[in-house]
Image (spheres, rainbow, N blue to C red):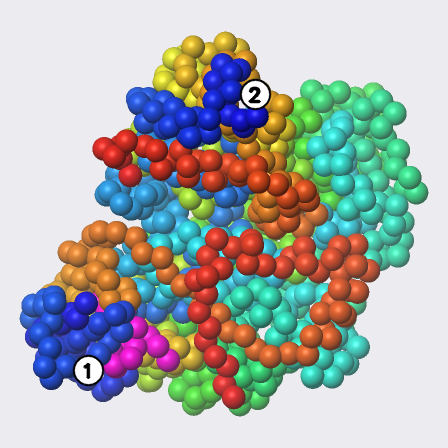
Amino acid sequence: MSNASLDGKSISIEDAYRRAAQILAGAKFPLIAGLGADVAGARAAILLAERLRGAYDHLASGDSLADIDTIRSFGMFTTTPNEARVRADVVLLIGPGLAGHWPGLFERLALDKPPRHGANAGKPRKIVWLGPKRGEGKIDGGEVKTIAAAPHEISGVLAAWRARLGGRPVALEPAKVKATDALVSTLKEARFGVAVWAAGAGLDALAVEMLQGLVTELNATTRFTGVPLGARSGAAGVNQTSGWMTGFPPRTGFGRGYPEHDPWRFEAGRLVESGEAAAALWISAYDGEPPPWGEADIPTITLAPAGAAPERGLYIEVGRPGRDHDAVEFAPEAGGLALRPAAAPSLRPSVASVIAAIGAKFPEDSPC
Amino acid sequence: MLTKLSGGRVVDPATGKDGVGDVWFENGHIVAPPFDSAPHADYDVSGHVVMAGAIDIHSHIAGGNVNTARLLLPELHRSIRARLSGTPLSTAKWSTFETGRIYAQMGFTTVVEPAMAPHHALQTHLELADTPIIDTGALTVLGNDDFLLRMLRAGESENAIIDYVARTVDATRSLGLKCINPGGVEGFKENMRVFGLDDEVPFYGVTSRKIFQTLQRATQKLGIHHPLHLHMNNLGIAGNIDTALATIDAAQGLPLHLAHVQFYAYGKEGKNGFSSAAAAFAEKINANKNVTVDIGAVMFSQTVTISSDVLKQFNSLAGAIPKKGAIFDGDANGGGIVPYAYKVSNFYNAVQWIAGLELFLLVDDPAQVFFTTDHPNGGPFTSYPELFALLMSADLRRQWMERLPAEALEGTLLPTLTREYTLNEIAVMSRSGAAKLFGFTDRGALRPGAIADVAVYKDQRDKAGMFRKAAYVFKNGQLIVKDGETTRYTRGKTLRTRPVYDTAIERRLDGYYDDLYGLPLSVFDLPDAALPNFDAFAEVSCRQ
């Protein structure tokens, strides 16, 4: 069985590379999207977009940009999960389904154990969870104070905390003001507090900014910082790679021969639906997530693991990063980029090697 | 291919040359003039200055903190022009690709990133691997890491500490050690907002003095060429000249490199309580030949400060321009990214500008003082040509001084300093001296056997223009810049040093990482498989 197909019918891999090269080199404005890849795959994809004067976007940019927009419009306090593990005496969890965004989260933060460093070393941590899912706010061995809030209510609750921290009045009934003040005291009394959130849990940029505003103001008298869990499908590593290669995160285009970043203009779904993109290379090597757009009447090439072949368009199978092949990606347990050796090495090609193979088939007069 | 550069003014302090002559190279190395061969390529460089490729000893060009700065400030780096063919992303402003291109165009062929966090070394190396043309290297940051502080608290033997230092330098593939506000960054995690040379780190009971002295001795014992590269306490604070002088007194007579010293040359004189103390600082440097410094000169421009001195950066947040910043409490040092605009009309910025130039002009030996703006902290590296010009012209300095607030000049020496750097002194500072500081024996000189990294500048009155766009730059003998434009990419090497250590320290570290983090040490390692350029490392040998 071949590992490439066209409209669901098996074709040879050489044929697939040649057709992919024709589609991309022939497109006036190609889009490279999905970008669910390791660092090497992202790097190859961005260089390809640059070569073709196309645009690139990541499938979870919407989530990533909640954090990035907060950084670039306001600023941000962050730490690593490991520093939170060893030092955090107060942990503020924010939003539903945090462990879904990183299954290893609670093991890494070791919330059931006291911090090892700092003024409150050896004492149980204080854990507050704002807006957990129903029944979620329990951690084995740790006592969690939960505060119910739907995702869209979180920034309002944080705003009330921030107001009380600054000694300003809030329009709440007296009992709630009292409870808010008690909570704010817990935050203020932290010696090294850490807020943990995932933008993908429904927090928009204003909610993240409200949280960071609170953290900033807490730092006037004590230490408080944050751990962003980031977005799915290798987003954190792709954002870093994009940053050093072009200066910008994804949603960046090269139409003028240099990178321009515009979160609206270069959003993949918009480029496809508006007809601006003339062809698409969709990359989703981690889990084969399909594109967000429906029937696109532009030629599409999909790079995804086995089982994720679309019914229409060109498909080339790739291995899963860190499973089929060694991969450098953002490793949350390390708080940075790290090598994930292949867990089940196979001959399935990496995104980077497929892009190299496609690039080798470009017509000679195509730009480089 | 045998190449000859004919009839240029060869300025090469390493060989004592300063006069018209020829430079020959073949197969990537400088060669002696052959008796019987004609060159395959002969460049007439009469009217030009020929130097070895320049070496920047301290420039923040790679790593997570630099990348955070890129993402923090999209408005500071909008690109404006398409790149030339064959040089992808070379006009993507502030990309690693543009960094390599612009350094090359200025005749720089080796650049050292001075602040690599051990737990984030992989990203630094990936960024350096994506920086074309130039050779690079990095310094590993220790001094706020729990493991070292624990060893000091427990009074462990110097040998144990040396093994840890050597293992860390080796594992992170660096050129040596940097120490950034030793103990102060750990103190900031415990809510200290100032931290001096003799303050104790909470819960460890060790002082900054002890931490840096320990690392200084370890560096010497291991034979690492580059002396401990120290970012002192109290950066940027009025009166911190006292810290600087006391640090030099604490240097035990051993080699010590003090980073971006302009930021420590501040007294408390005058009605604003802020003054240049460069004269006292320079006198101290002149009297202590074991000390080398780089300046970290301030150039008037919008820039961003990137530093692993998280305490200092937190204190700078309130004055950020534009008003935003990122504070990262790392596993050890972390980082703080705070944008700032140095303005010619601002009294404090003017004093900083004056202090930097005074230090350059008052330190006698150009082999003791190095050329930096602490890119991008005092100004971007692209402002180097303007700084060279200021050092070479008292008249140009006078023109600039006319634009400064008059009170900034009160009590300063700068208006009286007539020294003008010669091309030879520029070459000592940026070539031969820089190579010596890192133990590079294959560069910074045009002697036969050295790699053929050569910069050719058209001699002209406009010194900034001369150094901004080299007429020719050869990297490993290959022409990569012509008339100030990069014509193609080559792939640089990353330079590292490999001190020897007892591998028993690795078993101990494994136990430590397992106990504290529940992780294997290897999570933070840099195996060849992680590095696209694993075959492009070159070793700088330790002293025997």
Q: Residues within 10 Å of mark 1 (few under 14, many from 20)?
A: some
Q: Nearer the viewer, residue A325 or B128?
A: A325
Report in which chain the residue with disc 1 lies.
Answer: B
Up/down of A279 relative to B168, above or below: above
Type of the residue with mark 2 = Ala
* Image position of A200 (left or right of A274): right
Could you tell me which residue is drawn at 55 percent across and 33 percent down?
A318
Up/down of B48 relative to A366, above or below: below
Type of the residue with mark 1 = Ala
Report in which chain the residue with disc 2 lies.
Answer: A
The quarter of the picture where residue B59 lies is bottom left
- Magenta segment includes B445: yes
Q: Position of residue B50 (x, y in %)?
A: 18, 72
**Element type at marker 1?**
loop
Figure quadrant of the N terminus of chain B: bottom left
* Image position of B392 (left or right of B126): left
**Element type at marker 2?**
loop
* Image position of A303 (left or right of A170): left
What residue is shown with label 2?
Answer: A309
Magenta residues span B441-455
What residue is shown with label 1?
Answer: B32
Up/down of B372 relative to B345, above or below: below
Marks 1 and 2, how far apart in space? 63 Å
Q: Can you name the residue that lies furthest to the front here?
A: A1
Residue B137 in view: no
- Numbered disc in front, either 1 or 2: 2
Q: Position of residue B489 (x, y in %)?
A: 30, 53
* Image position of A191 (left or right of A297): right
Could you tell me which residue is drawn at 56 percent across and 54 percent down?
B529
Could you tell me which residue is drawn at 48 percent across and 79 percent down?
B541
